[in-house]
Image: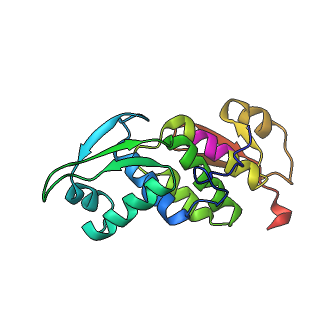
């Protein structure tokens, strides 16, 4: 299945704001044990610490996330009272969209950094690594098949080992003439 798809504002045809999407992903990774539709209580100070931002900016971000259909937010009544948040957009959908956007903009280092964040599930990480390899036109060769590749001597192929965050090792064929 191709990663290419667009997330849209609920009820409009506008494409999502990438900055708000990045903050949403950070928030979802921090609360990765909370599923869609589940309500949690949080304090703005806690969110400010999690997203490395000010309370004032957190309020703006939450309003933007509500407008873009990522979550529902009910501010706490009175000073210091906890707010409630309910996630609407699944983490994997938001993550895959953002990863695809980074790849299409040729921001490979940023895409890899995104994959290495704590809380990214191994299936999503592996899917993104496969997508990245396909986009860069690098054929992945499972480690089990490396003996077959190394057994056939070819001056054109220079094998390289690549590790994925899921712990899988892959043999990569790299054509030395393209350097």
Q: In the image, 175: left or right of 31?
A: right
Counting every numbered tag in the picture gives 0
Is 136 located above or below residue 127 in the figure? below
Task: Say which residue appears at 73% left-offset and 32% top-offset.
Answer: 145
Q: Is residue 99 visible?
A: yes
Q: From this viewpoint, is residue 54 visible?
A: no
Image color mode: rainbow
Q: Residue furthest top?
A: 144
Q: Is residue 89 left or right of residue 30?
A: right
Assign the magenta stretch its main secondary structure.
Answer: helix
Residue 51: percent from left, percent from top: 33, 60
Q: Position of residue 102 (x, y in %)?
A: 62, 61
| Between 8 and 166, the one nearer to me in the picture | 8
The structure residue drawn at horizontal position 57% and vertical position 64%, both measured from the top left corner, is 109
Q: Residue at x 23, y 58 (%)?
A: 44
Q: Which segment did they paint magenta?
A: 125-130
Residue 35 among those drawn in magenta: no
Quadrant of the snapshot with the C terminus: bottom right
Position of residue 155 measured from the top left corner of the image (x, y, whole percent) = 86, 53
In this view, the residue in front, 85 or 12, is: 12
From what the image shows, is residue 107 above or below residue 140?
Answer: below
| Residue 37 placement (x, y as % from top left) | 41, 34
Q: 148 left or right of 161? A: right
**67, 104: nearer the viewer:** 67
Indicate whether residue 127 is drawn in magenta.
Answer: yes
Quarter placement of the N terminus: top right
131 or 162: nearer the eye? 131
């Amino acid at each position: 299945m191709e990663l290419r798809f667009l997330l849209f504002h609920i009820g409009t045809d506008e494409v999502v704001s990438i900055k708000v999407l990045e903050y949403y992903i950070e928030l979802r990774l921090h609360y990765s044990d909370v599923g869609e539709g589940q309500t949690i209580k949080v304090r703005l100070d806690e969110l400010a610490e999690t997203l490395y931002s000010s309370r004032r900016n957190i309020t703006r971000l939450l309003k933007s996330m509500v407008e873009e259909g990522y979550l529902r937010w009910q501010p706490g009544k009175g000073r210091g009272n906890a707010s409630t948040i309910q996630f609407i957009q699944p983490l994997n959908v938001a993550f895959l969209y953002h990863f695809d956007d980074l790849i299409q903009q040729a921001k490979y280092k940023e895409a890899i950094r995104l994959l290495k964040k704590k809380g990214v599930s191994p299936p999503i990480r592996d899917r993104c690594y496969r997508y990245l390899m396909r986009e860069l036109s690098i054929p992945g060769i499972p480690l089990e098949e490396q003996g077959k590749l190394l057994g056939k001597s070819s001056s054109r192929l220079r094998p390289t080992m690549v590790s994925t965050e899921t712990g899988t090792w892959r043999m990569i064929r790299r054509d030395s003439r393209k350097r």
